[in-house]
Image (cartoon, rainbow, N blue to C red):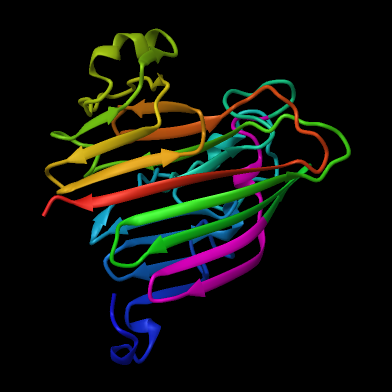
Amino acid sequence: MIAAPRLPSLDQIATAVQSLVTDGPAAGCRAIDVRVWGGIDIRVLPDRGFDIGAAWFRGVPLAWISDIGERPPLEDRLGDHWRERFGGGLVVTCGLSNVGAPSEGHGLHGTYSHRRATDVHVERSAEEVALRARISDPPFEVERRIATRLATGLLRIDDRVRNAGAEAAPAPMLYHVNVGAPLWDEGGYLETDADEIVPRDAAAAAGLATWGIPPTPADGAPERVFEHVGATEARLTSAAAGLTLTVRSSFPRLWQWVHPATGVYALGIEPANCSVLGRAPDEVRESWLTIEARSHA
């Protein structure tokens, strides 16, 4: 770290710029662009559940961004409409009403990522930049803290979820960590500490032998989803980018999403907690996610 007597302003090593998008599809949406010396730079989207959009580590882009890009949140959150606003980004939170396919009156991947954050605060020091906010996804209230460390490639999300309703309710949750080229590209490879890797369907079964290797892009290729049973972390290594990206969380399950279609070409590392147990009113649960980038140099 830089000693305080040599640091006249934190702006020299850590900035957090809050803005309002003025043009394009995301016009009117808020953004916070954080840049830190020697760490992971992030673009946080307060109007999209306080999730993380674009991200870089020492100039290398980490996040997969879809051709949809940044968009305002959906008003109609039912059915399959979630896909219409899936712009990608380093972290998209799925839940809290549903994770996965539409079911029991709940839309694909729930409603959380289309909620607007309130009580947004920025805290800076010579060690980290931390962002805090509250997100309401009835009946749940979420307190989120995002911190990116200086001089290390460590990013951490801490969530405190409280059931503010009068009745018990299930609260599935999944961190959709999205990575694209140059990390997820030829010569890269993914590893996990799973006891077993289980394909979701026939498309995944066909690609089971090569789940850890970036596939060759193909027009119209279907997505593949695998569960990494018992896994506690996933590591993506890219010799071309000179980086290893490691994802860890407090959640007990880990899924992998691979979409090899031309024009999509994405990898999703997805820690999840999709318990069927309900929550008692006013019960609080906490979870965390870390993303660590390390240079090979």
**Residue 29 visible:** no
Residue 131: in magenta span:
yes
Q: Percent x, y for residue 111?
A: 66, 40
Q: Percent x, y for residue 86?
A: 50, 41
Of residues 202 and 261, the one drawn nearer to the viewer in this rendering: 202
Quarter in which the N terminus is drawn: bottom left
**Residue 16 visible:** yes
Span shown in magenta: 107-134
Please tell me which residue is depicted at 38% across the width and 82% down the height of the picture. Answer: 11
Please tell me which residue is depicted at 37% across the width and 41% down the height of the picture. Answer: 247
Outermost residue toward the right?
166
Quarter in which the C terminus is drawn: bottom left
Say if 248 sits above or below 59 in the image.
Answer: above
Left or right of 115 on screen, residue 39 = left
Q: Percent x, y for residue 113?
A: 59, 45
Please tell me which residue is depicted at 33% across the width and 49% down the height of the picture. Answer: 292
Say if 167 sits above or below 227 in the image.
Answer: below
Please tell me how many numbered marks the rendered image carries: 0
Please tell me which residue is depicted at 68% across the width and 38% down the height of the picture. Answer: 77
> Quadrant location of residue 88?
top left
> Quadrant location of residue 174?
top right
Residue 167: in magenta span:
no
Left or right of 134 on screen, residue 226 = left
Q: Percent x, y for residue 81?
A: 61, 34
Of residues 76 and 60, the one drawn nearer to the viewer in this rendering: 60
> Quadrant location of residue 187?
top left
